[in-house]
Image: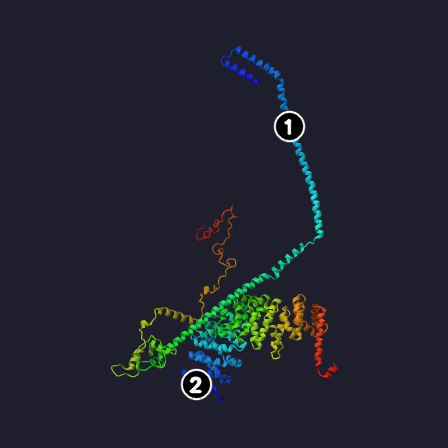
C-alpha cells in the first residue's frame, strides 16, 4: 500500500464503527498496515483520535478484532518514543494487559508484541508497562505451548529488563529466570535468540542478578549453543557469557573452569565480522580480573586467535576491542607479556597507533595496550623491531626494557650489537637528565667504551655524508 | 676301727638278743668300756698315718681358702683399676672433643641459619602468597578440560549438522514424491513416450522411474496446502448443489437432514450433578445478595464479640502448653515428699446450717 499525501486515516474511522464485524476487522487491519509503513501515517493515526476507539473496543469485541486492534497499537508505537507515549496516554496499557489473559494465543501474541514495542524505547515507558501489571502475565505467556507466544513474551521481557536494574529486578522477581533457562534447550532458533538476549540484559546490571542467572544452571547448555547453526543465537550466547564474566573474578573463574574460554575461542575462529565483538570483549574481561585468569586465557590458546582477529578485521571498533583485550592479557607479568609478544602482535599495534586514519578510540586503546605490555615485556626479539620504528613516547618504554634485560644476559648483548640495535640507540637524541637519557646511559654502560664510541663515530660519518649531498649554499651555512 | 666296735656290739646283740640275762648285760657294759681303749690303741698305733692324712687335709683346706682370698683381692684391684682408667679416658676424650669443636668453629663457615631461613621462606610463599606448582597443576588440568570441551562441542556440531542434512534430504525426498504423484499423467505409455523418457536418451530420467514406482494422487487424499479446520473424520459423500436426475432427494432436504441440530430430551440435557449445581447457584446468589457478612448476634451475646486472647504463658511457638488448659496447678512431687496431699474438700462451714430456721415463722422457733 503506497499511499502518499491526500490520504487521511480519518476516512477509515466510520468503517471501524460499522455494524458488520468483518468490515471492522478489515478496516483495523488496513489501519495497522498503514501505520506500520510510515512514521507520518502513524502520527496521522494518532492525531485522528482513532486510538481511544480502538482501545475501547479492545476490551469488548471478538478475538479477530482484538488481534487487529493490537496490531494497530503496535504499528503506531514502534516508530518513536513520542508515539509510544501517545499510545500509553490513550489508556492502551490496561486493555492490552487484559487481553494478555485471553484464551486465544493469537490475541496474546498481538498484545505481547504491542507491549514489547511500547517498552523498547526508554525506561519510563517500560516502567509504565510494569506498573500496569504486565510482567507476571508475560511470565505466564512464556509457559504457553505455542512457539510464537513464547518468542514474543521473551522479547518483551528482554526489552523491559534492558533499561535499568530495578526493572530487571522486577522481571526476576516474577520468576522469569527459571522459565527462560528451561527454554534454552528448545530447538527453535528465534526463541533461543530472544531467551539469550533476555538473560544477558538481566545479568548485565549487577552482580546479584548475574549470580541468579548462573544459579539457574545455564552454564553447560550455553556452551553447546555456541555451536548452534544460527548466527544470532551464537552471538547472543556469547553476549550472555560476557555479561556474566565482567562482574567479578569468581564468576569468571567459574566460566573458565567450565571450559567457557575454550568454547569462546573456537567461536571466534568460526565467525567473521561484527559478531566477534562480544567474544573478544569476554576474553578481555576475563583476563582483566587477575593474572591467573589471564594465564588461563593464554593456556587456552587465546592469544593466537586474538592476533588473527586483529589481522583480519577491518572495522575500527573491533580492532580497538581486540587491542584492549590483548593489553589486558599482557599487562600482568613478564610471562604474560612474552606470550602476547610472541604472537607478533606488537608491530601491528604500533601500526594502528601510528596510522592517521584510525579512529581516536583505536589509537588510544592501541597506545594503552602497547604501554602496558611493554612495561612488562622482556622478550628481546619482539622488542627489536619496535626499536627501529616507534615514536618517542613508546621508545622510552622499549629502551627501559632493553636496559633491564641487557644488564644480565650476555648472549642478548651480543645479538643486540650484531643486529644493529646499539647503533640505533646511539642515534637517538635525548635531552640530558631525562629518563630516556638515563636508560641510554645504562645501556651504554653494558658495553665496552670502544664499541659505543666507534658506533657514534659511524653515525657521525653517516650524518656528514648526508650533508655532503646537500647544495652548496647550505653547506656554507654548516 | 669304730665300725669294728659297732659290729661287735651288733653281733653280741644278735647273739644274745632273745635272752637278755644280767650276765649278758654286764658283759655288754664291759665290752662297751673296752671300746674306748681299743680306740685309743688304734690311734696310738697309727698316729703317723693319721697325722699325715690330717695334715694333707688341712693343707688342702687352707690352700683353697687362701686361693679364694687372693682371687677376691685380685678382683677388687681389677675393678678399681678399671674405674680409674675409665675416668681418666673420659677426661682425656672430652678435652680432645672440646679442642676439636673450637678448631672447627674457628675455621669453617656455619650456614645452618641460612638453611632454616630458606626453608621458611619457601614454605611461607608457597602457602600464603603464590604456589607455583598448584598453579601449574591447575593450568594442566584446565588444558585437559578445554580439550574435552572442544571435542564435545565438535561432536555436538557434527551431530547437529548430520541431523539437519538428514531432515533436508527427507524433505527433498517427500517433495519429489509429491511432485511425482501430481505429475503422474506424464508417465510414458507404449504408444507415446513421456516427457521424461525421451527416445534419444540412453536410459530414462529419474523422474520417469519415480513416476513408474508411485501411485497416483487422488483428489480426496491430496495433502491440504492450506491449514484448514476440516476434520477428516466427517467423510460423508458430498451433496450436489442441484438435484441430479433420477430418484434422488432434494439437496436442500439432504442438507437439512445432515446438519439438523441435536435436540436432546430434558432428561438427557440435564447434567448428573444438576442438583448440586443448582444448590451452588442458590448459595452463590445468597452470598452475592447478602449485605452484611457477620452473623446477627442476639443482645445477650453482643458483648461477647471479642475473641479470647490466650496468654503468652499458655501458648508456645510450637504447640499449646497443657498448663492452663488441662491442669492449673504446678506440682513438684519431689518437693512434697513428706507432705500430706492437698485437700480438695474442706470441713464444712457451719454458718449456714441454721439458715432459714432461726427466723420465726409462726411458731417454728428453734
Residue in view at x 66 percent, y 33 percent: B74
Which of the pair A199/B210 is nearer the observer?
Answer: B210
Q: Which residue is mark 2?
A: A15
Q: Indicate whether B189 appears above or below A257.
A: below
Secondary element at tag 2: helix
- Taking the image as shown, residue B89 lies to the left or right of residue A147, namely right
Q: Which residue is mark 1?
A: B65
Q: Quadrant of residue A362?
A: bottom right
| Residue A379 seen in the current view | yes
**Marks 2/1: CA–CA distance:** 159 Å
Which of the pair A388/A140 is nearer the observer?
Answer: A388
| Residue A333 seen in the current view | no
Which of the pair A79/A309 is nearer the observer?
Answer: A309
Question: CB of mark 2 within 8 Å of CB of mark 1?
Answer: no
Camera-near label (2 vs 1) is: 1
Secondary element at tag 1: helix
Residue in view at x 70 percent, y 45 percent: B96
Residue A134 position within the rendered picture, expressed as x and y whole percent measured from the top left: 49, 74
Residue B128 position within the rendered picture, expressed as x and y whole percent measured from the top left: 61, 60
- Taking the image as shown, residue A334 lies to the left or right of residue A273, namely right
Amino acid at each position: 500500500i503506497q499511499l502518499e499525501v491526500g490520504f487521511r486515516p480519518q476516512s477509515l474511522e466510520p468503517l471501524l464503527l460499522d455494524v458488520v464485524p468483518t468490515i471492522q476487522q478489515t478496516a483495523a487491519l488496513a489501519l495497522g498496515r498503514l501505520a506500520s509503513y510510515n512514521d507520518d501515517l502513524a502520527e496521522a493515526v494518532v492525531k485522528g483520535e482513532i486510538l481511544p476507539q480502538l482501545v475501547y473496543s479492545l476490551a469488548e469485541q471478538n478475538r479477530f478484532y482484538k488481534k487487529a486492534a493490537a496490531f494497530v497499537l503496535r504499528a503506531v508505537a514502534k516508530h518513536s518514543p513520542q508515539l509510544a507515549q501517545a499510545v500509553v496516554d490513550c489508556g492502551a496499557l490496561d486493555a492490552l494487559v487484559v487481553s494478555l489473559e485471553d484464551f486465544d494465543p493469537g490475541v496474546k501474541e498481538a498484545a505481547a508484541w504491542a507491549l514489547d514495542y511500547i517498552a523498547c524505547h526508554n525506561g519510563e515507558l517500560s516502567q509504565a508497562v510494569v506498573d500496569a501489571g504486565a510482567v507476571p502475565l508475560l511470565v505466564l505467556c512464556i509457559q504457553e505451548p505455542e512457539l510464537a507466544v513464547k518468542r514474543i513474551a521473551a522479547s518483551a521481557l528482554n526489552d523491559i529488563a534492558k533499561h535499568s536494574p530495578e526493572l530487571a529486578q522486577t522481571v526476576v522477581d516474577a520468576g522469569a529466570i527459571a522459565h527462560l533457562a528451561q527454554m534454552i534447550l528448545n530447538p527453535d532458533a528465534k526463541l533461543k535468540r530472544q531467551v539469550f538476549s533476555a538473560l544477558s540484559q538481566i545479568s548485565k546490571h549487577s552482580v546479584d542478578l548475574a549470580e541468579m542467572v548462573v544459579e539457574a544452571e545455564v552454564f553447560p547448555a550455553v556452551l553447546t549453543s555456541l555451536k548452534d547453526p544460527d548466527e544470532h543465537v551464537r552471538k547472543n550466547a556469547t553476549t550472555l557469557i560476557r555479561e556474566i564474566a565482567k562482574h567479578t573474578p569468581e564468576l569468571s573463574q567459574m566460566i573458565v573452569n567450565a571450559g567457557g574460554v575454550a568454547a569462546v575461542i573456537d567461536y571466534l575462529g568460526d565467525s567473521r565480522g561484527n559478531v566477534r565483538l562480544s567474544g573478544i570483549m569476554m576474553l578481555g574481561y576475563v583476563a582483566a580480573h587477575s593474572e591467573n585468569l589471564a594465564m588461563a586465557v593464554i593456556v587456552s590458546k587465546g592469544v593466537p586467535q586474538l592476533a588473527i582477529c586483529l589481522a583480519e578485521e577491518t572495522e575500527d571498533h573491533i580492532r580497538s576491542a581486540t587491542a584492549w583485550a590483548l593489553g589486558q592479557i599482557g599487562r600482568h607479568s613478564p610471562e604474560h607479556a612474552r606470550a602476547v609478544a610472541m604472537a607478533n602482535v606488537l608491530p601491528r599495534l604500533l601500526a594502528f597507533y601510528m596510522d592517521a586514519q584510525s579512529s581516536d578510540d583505536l589509537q588510544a586503546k592501541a597506545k594503552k595496550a602497547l604501554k602496558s605490555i611493554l612495561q612488562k615485556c622482556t622478550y628481546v626479539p619482539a622488542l627489536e623491531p619496535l626499536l627501529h620504528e616507534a615514536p618517542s613516547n613508546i621508545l622510552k618504554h622499549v629502551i627501559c626494557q632493553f636496559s633491564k634485560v641487557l644488564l644480565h644476559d650476555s648472549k642478548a648483548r651480543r645479538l643486540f650489537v650484531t643486529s644493529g640495535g646499539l647503533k640505533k640507540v646511539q642515534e637517538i637524541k635525548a635531552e640530558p637528565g631525562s629518563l630516556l637519557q638515563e636508560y641510554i646511559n645504562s645501556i651504554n654502560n653494558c658495553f665496552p667504551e670502544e664499541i659505543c664510541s666507534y658506533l657514534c663515530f659511524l653515525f657521525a660519518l653517516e650524518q656528514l655524508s648526508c650533508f655532503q649531498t646537500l647544495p652548496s649554499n647550505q653547506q656554507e651555512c654548516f | 676301727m669304730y665300725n669294728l666296735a659297732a659290729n661287735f656290739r651288733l653281733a653280741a646283740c644278735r647273739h644274745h638278743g632273745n635272752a637278755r640275762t644280767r650276765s649278758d648285760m654286764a658283759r655288754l657294759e664291759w665290752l662297751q668300756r673296752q671300746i674306748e681303749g681299743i680306740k685309743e690303741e688304734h690311734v696310738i698305733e697309727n698316729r703317723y698315718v693319721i697325722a699325715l692324712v690330717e695334715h694333707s687335709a688341712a693343707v688342702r683346706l687352707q690352700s683353697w681358702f687362701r686361693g679364694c682370698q687372693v682371687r677376691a683381692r685380685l678382683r677388687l684391684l681389677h675393678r678399681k683399676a678399671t674405674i680409674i682408667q675409665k675416668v681418666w679416658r673420659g677426661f682425656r676424650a672430652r678435652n680432645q672433643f672440646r679442642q676439636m669443636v673450637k678448631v672447627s668453629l674457628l675455621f669453617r663457615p656455619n650456614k645452618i641459619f641460612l638453611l632454616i631461613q630458606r626453608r621458611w621462606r619457601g614454605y611461607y610463599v608457597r602457602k600464603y602468597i603464590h604456589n607455583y606448582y598448584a598453579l601449574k597443576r591447575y593450568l594442566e588440568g584446565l588444558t585437559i578440560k578445554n580439550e574435552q570441551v572442544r571435542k564435545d562441542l565438535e561432536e555436538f556440531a557434527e551431530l547437529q549438522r548430520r541431523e539437519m542434512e538428514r531432515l533436508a534430504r527427507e524433505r527433498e525426498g517427500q517433495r519429489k514424491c509429491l511432485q511425482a504423484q501430481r505429475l503422474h499423467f506424464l508417465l510414458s505409455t507404449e504408444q507415446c513416450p513421456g516427457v521424461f523418457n525421451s527416445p534419444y536418451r540412453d536410459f530414462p530420467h529419474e523422474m520417469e522411474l519415480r513416476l513408474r514406482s508411485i501411485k497416483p494422487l487422488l483428489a480426496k487424499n491430496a495433502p491440504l496446502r492450506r491449514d484448514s479446520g476440516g476434520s477428516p473424520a466427517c467423510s460423508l459423500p458430498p451433496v450436489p448443489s442441484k438435484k441430479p436426475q433420477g430418484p434422488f432427494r432434494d439437496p436442500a432436504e439432504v442438507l437439512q437432514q445432515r446438519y439438523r441440530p441435536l435436540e436432546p430430551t430434558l432428561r438427557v440435557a440435564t447434567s448428573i450433578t444438576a442438583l448440586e449445581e443448582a444448590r451452588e447457584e442458590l448459595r452463590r446468589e445468597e452470598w452475592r445478595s447478602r449485605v452484611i457478612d457477620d452473623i446477627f448476634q442476639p443482645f445477650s451475646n453482643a458483648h461477647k464479640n471479642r475473641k479470647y486472647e490466650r496468654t503468652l504463658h499458655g501458648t508456645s511457638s510450637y504447640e499449646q502448653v497443657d498448663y492452663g488448659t488441662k491442669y492449673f496447678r504446678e506440682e513438684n512431687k519431689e518437693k512434697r515428699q513428706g507432705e500430706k496431699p492437698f485437700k480438695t474438700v474442706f470441713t464444712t462451714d457451719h454458718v449456714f446450717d441454721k439458715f432459714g430456721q432461726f427466723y420465726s415463722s409462726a411458731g417454728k422457733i428453734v
